[in-house]
Image (cartoon, rainbow, N blue to C red):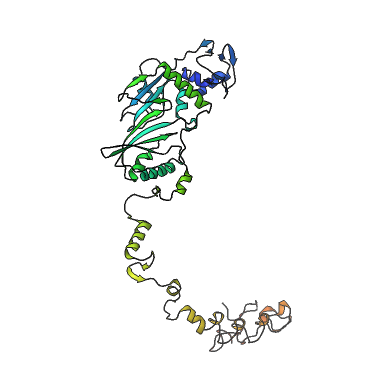
Amino acid sequence: MTTEDAGKERLQKILARAGYGSRRACEELIVEGRVTINNQTVSVLGVRADPFRDAIAVDGERIHLPKPAYWVLNKAEGASFNDAESEEALQELVKGEFGRLFTAGRLDRFARGLMVITNDGRVANLLTHPRYRVPKVYRVTVKGTLTPQAARNIERALYYAMNGGRFEPIQIGKRVGGKTQMLLTVYEGLPQAMRDICLKFGHGVKQVERVRLGPLELGAAAMGALRKLRADEVKLLLEYADDAENGRLSYERPLIDAAKFKRDESVTGFRRKKTGTRGTTTVGQKKTSARVKSKGGKPGGARKGKPGEARKPRSDSRGERKGSGRARDERGSTGKPRGERRSAGPGKPRDDRRSSGPGKPRGERRSSGPGKPKGERKGTGPGKPRGDRKGPGKPRTGGKPGGPRRGGSGPKRGSQGRRPGRK
């Protein structure tokens, strides 16, 4: 952004502040060619203008914006301007016609201190957004005596809680009545985890107060007091805002860096809580680990229902067959090979179990002779009908012992080719 564009805003933002609807509705007014700047029609988006120096008109009628005004509020504990009704609360707090009001920086309900209220949205954004490097100084009062080692622990935990947040090292202040004040300068919003972090290291937070925001300081203002900035203060604030917008601001002191934590081995880290409920272990893996550690063993060392009994190896527990006292490895070494366990006879090869004679190849098991055509393999001779292939009374090869099969001595059961003895 050049020097000529300093103090200018987008045209649709200016129209929205003047009460012509939302930004989308104001963009439609611009595209339709109903808006002029210094008597020149504007029909493209992205044009910037100064609402207090340029003559802006809609349908020939010039818009009027209230002059920028700035207030400093010493917010008390319990008040909140961060909810959806914050605009109404600000309108009740600031009397008069000033248009839409903004707050520069937010403070939660339990915090107190400096808060800037203005109708200048540009200045409010410059004082709030982290990229403009505007410092925000907080005075945090904690319980107990804060040592340098405890301050380093809080810095490390706060760094990771803010995902690499930009803030300066903690400055330890006064120690009064069992409490310690520390100054914390951040360049973005103060996280809500600040209270939990201090409590983690034994220093509960009693009070959080913002004492400075950019060039403005709280001073000795009474609690809940609201005052309007003087002319010299407004000039200083606008110059500071221009420097922030043009990138001329830099960090006042070196920030906290993760490399410092790697070199300092004495600093204790803040461990984030894992998933699950807080407190003692009650269910699941945590309960099992705690029970095993109390017994002095390892997880899985005792069988369910038999405490103190060592579990057998998997090979022994699964190596025995039901009803058999012989292990698998013993059966394999002393018994028969696996291929002969269910064979037709002892010592016979697997191919001869159900064949008509020993020693014949597999292709000749049921054939009448080698080398015959496919149609003559199971017949008694070539050219005979299918029903005459096997004569009556001839026992079936491989039949049951104890005599001829049923119906084997009787006559054939027809000449339709059905084998005798089958029904």
Residue 282 as seen in the image, left or right of residue 48: left
Q: Decide which of 293, 130 is in the foreground and name it.
A: 130
| Residue 9 at x, y percent in the picture | 52, 21
- Residue 172 lies in quadrant: top left
Is residue 236 shown to the viewer in this render? yes
The quadrant in which residue 413 appears is: bottom right
- In the image, 7 versus 87, the foreground residue is 7
Task: Determine if residue 83 is in view.
Answer: no
Image-quadrant location for residue 381: bottom right
Question: On the picture, is 326 further left or further right than 362?
Answer: left
Q: Is residue 408 above or below residue 51?
A: below
Q: Residue at x 50, y 84 (%)?
A: 334
Name the image quarter holding the C terminus.
Answer: bottom right
**Residue displayed at 34% across by 45% down:** 200
Residue lying furthest bottom in this view? 403
Please state if 421 lies on the left or on the right of 63 as rendered.
Answer: right
Give the answer, above or below, for where 350 lies relative to 76: below
Q: Position of residue 210 (x, y in %)?
A: 36, 30
The quarter of the picture where the N terminus appears is top right
Give above or below for 257 relative to 31: below
Q: Residue at x 43, y 40 (%)?
A: 162
Please provide percent x and percent y for residue 339: 56, 80
The structure residue drawn at horizontal position 62% and vertical position 81%, both measured from the top left corner, is 351
* Label tally: 0
Instruction: Indicate the position of residue 296 as horizontal and vertical percent values.
Output: 34, 65
